[in-house]
Every structure is written in C-alpha cells, then in structure tokens.
Amino acid sequence: MEEARADPIAGLEPCADPGTSDVRAAIIRAILSRKSVSPRHLKDPAPNEAEIHLMLHAALAAPDHGSLRRWRTVLIPQSRRNQLAEIFKAAKLEEDPNATQDDLDRAGAKAFNAPTLLVILIDPVQGHTKVTVEEQFIALGAALQNFILTAHSLGYGAMITSGDKVRTHAFHSCFARAASERVAAFISIGTPARGNLMRSFPQVSRSISSWQGSE
C-alpha cells in the first residue's frame, strides 16, 4: 500500500486581513481538502434548492470552449426513487441477463442512498468546426468539479458515479431527450455520516515531467 504523503494544505493559513488573499486561500483549501463520499454514507440534511442552484451556477462558470454547455442536470426527487429503483434493476438485467433477485435488489437499493441525487446528461455537438467531442466532455468534467467543490465548500459530501449502467437502454430511454443525448453520470450529495478521514496525496513528481524535445 502506498504510504500517505504530506498534507499540502497543512501549512496554508488564511491571511489576517480580508480580501483577495483570503479568497485564494479558501479556494486552494477547498480544492485540496475535498474528497468523494460514497452515496451510502450520505445522509440528511441535504442541500436546499438555493444551495443546489448555487452549485449549478458554479458548474456553469467552468471553462467551456465555445460556451456550448451541452450538458444538463435532472434532479431525482424522493417521490420518484421507487421508479428510479426499477430503472436500476432494468439496467442490471441489461448488463447481466442472469442476474439473481438478490443482484436486482442490490441494484435497486442504489436509488435510495443519497438524500440528493442528480442525473447528468450530455448531448455533444458532432462535427463542430472548432470544438471536438473530447473537448466537450472535458468541459463537462470541469463543470462537475466546480459543482462538487461548491457542495464541499457548503459543508456537504458528494460523489460522481457512472459505470456501465449509465450506458444502458433503460437509462437512456427514461432520461434522454434525443437519440444523441447520453447519461454521463450521477451526482450524489448529502451530509457525510462519518467524520473526516485522512486523505493521502500521491507524489506530484509522478504527474509531471519536462519535455526534452527531439535530439
């Protein structure tokens, strides 16, 4: 098991006088202290409507080449969780036609885990003259990061999940508005049921190298 690295936020203290420096420190601390919390460990209280809208405003502020913003979110209310559970079960049967009843029950149970659950969809523009499909997915990733960072800054836990199930006909037929639109992920949000856990940071040196050019 890889040994935990030094905490990069340990020495980062907010500045004494309010202003830009404090904002920078708060942003850096939020980024480096955020960690995903499994949906089954998210409980009430959940974010209210104004807080969810704030998260969406942050997502819409993410860099997006061409300002295409080809993604949208769908909030799943508690009153629809039973229906969502059936979609999870149908998706499981698509993935595994030999799934047992226990398998289906476990799949359906995922619909009830987090108090706030959103479905994220994307309908990328094909053949754009400047913005590739890959760039549109990168933009979605940036938006999702802003979303969960805002959730973290408000004191909530969150996690982005996907998996093969989002690519099933069961999910596409229930959520997509067009044949070209696809379910990209879920965002689960709530209050962490467990206290903060220590987070290990990989060595930065493994993620950067200097280009040597051609000899």
Image (cartoon, rainbow, N blue to C red):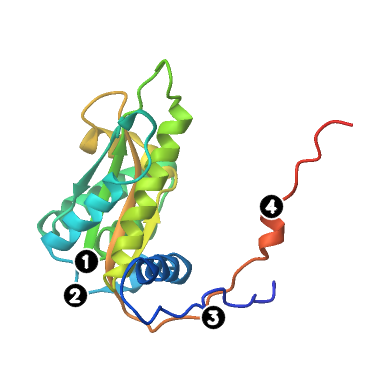
Where residue 161 sits in the image (x, y, percent)? 40, 54
Query: The disc labelled 4 sits on which kind of residue?
Result: Ile
Residue hosting label 3: 11
Query: The disc labelled 2 sits on which kind of residue?
Result: Pro
Residue hosting label 4: 208
Q: Residue 84: which disc?
A: none
**In the shown orientation, is residue 47 left or right of residue 196?**
left
Report how far apart the C-alphas of labels 4 and 1 lie in the structure.
38 Å
Q: Which of the two discs, 1 and 2, labels the residue nearer the N terminus?
A: 2
Disc 4 versus disc 1: nearer the observer: 4
Query: The disc labelled 1 sits on which kind of residue?
Result: Pro
Q: Could you tell me which quadrant the C terminus lies in? A: top right
**175 or 132: nearer the eye?**
132
Residue hosting label 2: 45
**31 or 171: nearer the eye?**
31
Report how far apart the C-alphas of labels 1 and 2 lie in the structure.
8 Å
Q: Residues within 10 Å of mark 4 (few under 14, many from 20)?
A: few
> Dividing the picture into quarters, in which one does residue 154 lie?
bottom left
Residue 214 to residue 102: above or below = above
Report how far apart the C-alphas of labels 3 and 1 lie in the structure.
34 Å
> Dividing the picture into quarters, in which one does residue 71 lie?
top left
Q: Which of the two discs, 3 and 1, labels the residue nearer the N terminus?
A: 3
Disc 2 versus disc 3: nearer the observer: 3
Question: Marks 1 and 2: CB-CB under 8 Å?
Answer: yes
